[in-house]
Structures are given as C-alpha cells and as structure tokens.
Image (cartoon, grey):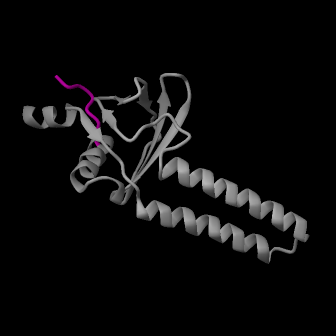
Amino acid sequence: MTNQKLLISAPLTICPIFSKKLAFLITITHGGALVGIWFAALDIKIKIALSIWVLIVSYYNTNKHLFFKYRQITKKIILQYDYILLTNELTATILSHVYVHSRFIILPLKLSNKKYETLILFEDSLDETTFHYLRVRLLHPLKNIN
C-alpha cells in the first residue's frame, strides 16, 4: 500500500509532443467552419471576412495547442501532488473541472501569475506509460499521503 502511495505521489514529468490526433481535430473543425461559411447565404464580403477570421483562429490554435507558442506552458511540465511546476519558474494549480477520457485529457490550469491556461493532451502526445499515470492521478487523487 505504501508503494502505491509513493508511486502516485512521486513527481511525474510530462513532456508533450506534437499530436497528430489534435492536429486532425483542429483541421477538421476549422475546415468545416470554412465550408459552412461558403455554403451560407451571405454577402461575398462577409464570407471573405469570416473566412479570414477562421484562418487566423486556426493558425493561432495550431501554434498554441500543437507547438506551445503564445503561452506560458513549456514543453516540460512536472506534476507534483496537487500542483504543477513549469520549467520557466511558474507554478500552476489544477482546477477542479478536469476532463479525463481514455483517449485525451483536458487540463485547466491557474498559473501563479493569475492567468489561466488549458492543456489538451491526446494519447499520442505522451508516451503510453506517462499518459496512463497521468490519467490515474487525475481520476484518483490522493486525499492524504500519510
């Protein structure tokens, strides 16, 4: 029993990589939005403006969630018992509305500088063991380590 507690309470290093599944999801959703705009009964100027807006949002989301640009979360994250250490000297608290699925995890964070970030991790963005340990930690948090 104590070995299980030590395993779950030990720091877990998360190093997310490029996720093909998240890239596919972002491409499909933004591509569908573009198709929907062009099938809508709108003026051509509005269609062009909305299409440009969707392309800008798609570019931003791709860089933010796939390449970790425009955010304070880096590519190496250390999960402690109930908080996260970021490599650029920031800490983050995991918010209560975490979504854990067998294929992906949505991890909302409150950074120590009072900003909010969301980390979306598909199963192909982490190695299998790390993804499993992260799912177990989030689904079964320890109430008391002692």
Question: Does residue 58 appear to the left or right of 132 in the view shown?
Answer: right
- Looking at this view, name the residue that lies furthest to the bottom: 39
Residue 143 on the magenta segment: yes
Question: Does residue 89 appear to the left or right of 60 in the view shown?
Answer: left
Q: Is residue 87 above or below residue 118?
A: above
Residue at position x 31%, y 42% in the image: 14
Q: Can the viewer see residue 18?
A: yes
104 or 141: which is nearer to us? 104
Q: Can the viewer see residue 102?
A: no
Q: Is residue 71 above or below residue 122?
A: above
Q: Quadrant of residue 74?
A: top left
Question: Does residue 142 appear to the left or right of 43 in the view shown?
Answer: left
Magenta segment: 140-146
Residue at position x 40%, y 23% in the image: 89
Quarter of the image containing the N terminus? Answer: top left
Residue 43 on the magenta segment: no
Residue at position x 48%, y 22% in the image: 112
Q: Quadrant of residue 8?
A: top left
The image shows residue 145 at horizontal and vertical percentages of 20, 25
Q: Is residue 119 above or below residue 20?
A: above
